[in-house]
Image: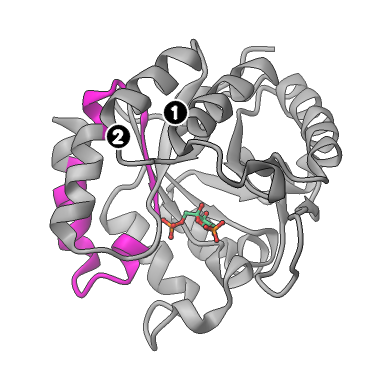
Amino acid sequence: MKVRLDKITTKGKALYLAYDQGMEHGPIEFNDENVDPESIISLAQKGKYTAMIFQKGIAEKYSSSIKKSKIPLIVKLNGKTSLYKGDPISRQLCTVKEAIQLGASAVGYTIYIGSEQESTMLQEFEKIEREAHAKGIPVVAWIYPRGKATEGKPEGELMVYAARIGLEIGADVVKLKYNRNEKDLAWAVKSAGKTKIVISGGSKVDERVFLKEVKETMEANAFGVAVGRNVWQHKNPLEMTKKIKEIIFS
Ligand code: FBP
């Protein structure tokens, strides 16, 4: 079956609004406004994001607003909290079938390469990828090098490795942490072949710093950006969205 990447693509590029930090980091990331998922759905709609990313609980409880917004949904199938210490593992918490029932246009899964638990995540991903692709659903892989085995290894090398792993395991899109080196990113994009690369936003930085990263990302021929905190923690999220879109879609 044809994988419908076009459902999470805008003019050949992508701008995803990530909002799974409530689980990954805790409500410490939120203020009075952005703690409410409705504010994020409204931002995604007003900003015409390519897609928005939620865990299944938000996808289910806010499904009527999500559907009304007409913005495609990516359901994150695994997750972990920030409380657990040691080499990270993020296990599957939602099935592909459930995600489709929730209206997902794509599913997402995090793999911590280099973790002692890496093989468990690679195997879970493989099952998800097979099931999703059988139904034409694209798979977005967050591939983050983590754990003791990655300590001291050059960040650029790890980022490129993550990109290549995405291709090897059949991901349609890989979400990477950008090491802020344009050459490395261009090599990562090339190493990923027909698998698309988006960079993750990271913790909130000065607007100019983040916009520079977006520019470099697009110059490196990446697919786009999956951003959370650098938009919804901004004092004017919609204005920031417009500035990012000018770079990605112009
Ligand atoms: P941000 O743009 O807010 O960094 O979101 C991107 C993201 O990948 C989220 O999807 C996820 O919750 C978070 O970063 C994980 O960050 P980390 O693994 O560094 O704690």
Residue 79, position in %: x, y? Answer: 70, 57
Nearer-the-camera pick, 130 or 163: 163
Q: Does the image show residue 137?
A: yes
Q: Quadrant of the N terminus?
A: top right
Residue 152, position in %: x, y? Answer: 56, 44
Residue 130: image quadrant is top right
Would you name the residue on which mark 1 appears?
Answer: 197
Rendered residue at 52%/18% (across/down): 195
**Does ligand 1 reach within 8 Å of label 1's beta carbon?**
no
Nearer-the-camera pick, 105 or 236: 236
Q: Are marks 2 and 1 in contact (CB under 8 Å)?
A: no
Residue 49, position in %: x, y? Answer: 34, 47
Real-space Cα separation, disc 2 to disc 1, in angstroms: 15 Å
Rendered residue at 75%/53% (across/down): 90
Front tag of 2 and 1? 2
Q: Secondary structure at mark 2?
A: loop
Can residue 229 be found in the magenta stretch? yes
Residue 77, compared with residue 61, is above or below; it is above
Residue 196, position in %: x, y? Answer: 46, 23
Q: Looking at the rendered structure, which numbered label has been put on residue 26? A: none
Would you name the residue on which mark 2 appears?
Answer: 181
Rendered residue at 50%/38% (across/down): 175
Q: Secondary structure at mark 1?
A: strand
Q: Is residue 229 left or right of residue 172?
A: left
Q: Earlier in the sequence, mark 2 or mark 1?
A: 2
Under mark 1, the amino acid is Ile
The residue segment tinted magenta is 217-245
Under mark 2, the amino acid is Asn
Can residue 202 be found in the magenta stretch? no
Rendered residue at 37%/83% (across/down): 33
Q: Quadrant of the C terminus?
A: top left
